[in-house]
Amino acid sequence: MKQVYIADDPADAHLVAGILDQFGISCEIRGEDLWSARGQLPLTADTLPTVWIADDGKYEKAIELVKQFESGTLIAGKGDSPWTCPNCGEEVEAQFTNCWKCGANRSAETQT
């Protein structure tokens, strides 16, 4: 696992994780629980939420997406059209990575 992003807050970490997931890069957020201790702990890279990818082979692509996110130049790719939930069949708007109806995650296979 490799770290690809240090977030300012948990919401920011989840946003980046959602973008990576949308492009088929599996990741996890670490340090999110420490956010509630802010004020008692210094805000450093060790106490801020971080995003880590599971597949080291996708590191370069993940870093590229993070840089585009940070610069505001991220162009819609696979997620630019609605997708159908693989669990309940509901049509979900492109920007969402989870189904609003049943909560199922958008898998890489269902992306258009």
Image (cartoon, grey):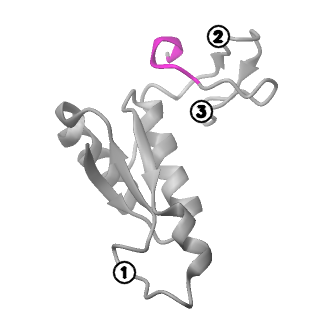
Q: Amino acid at mark 2?
A: Pro
Residue 70, magenta (yes or no): no
Q: Nearer the viewer, residue 75 or 103?
A: 103
| Labels 3 and 2 touching (C-beta < 8 A) | no
Residue, disc 3: 97
Q: Say if the magenta span includes residue 107.
A: yes
In 3D space, how far apart are the residues under numbered discs 2 and 1 (Cα atoms)?
A: 39 Å
Q: Quadrant of residue 25?
A: top left
Residue occupying image coordinates x 54% and y 90%: 40
Specify start and end residues of the magenta stretch as a single range: 106-111
Q: Residue 39, located in which quarter of the rendered image?
A: bottom right
Of 54 and 99, nearer the camera is 54
Work out whether residue 15 or residue 103 is closer to the camera in this orientation and state it. 103
At which x and y percent is residue 45?
33, 74
Task: Classify residue 13 as left or right of residue 71.
Answer: right
Q: Which residue is mark 1?
A: 44
Q: Secondary structure at mark 1?
A: loop
User: What is the number of the mark on residue 86?
Assistant: 2
Badge 3: few (under 14), some or many (20 or more) residues near its Cα, within 10 Å? Answer: many
Q: Residue at x 74, y 9 (%)?
A: 89
Q: Which numbered disc, 2 or 1, marks the residue that appears first in the sequence?
A: 1
Q: Residue at x 44, y 71 (%)?
A: 48
Q: Is residue 43 above or below residue 57?
A: below
The mark that comes first in sequence, 3 or 2, is: 2
- Say what amino acid the circle numbered 1 marks: Thr
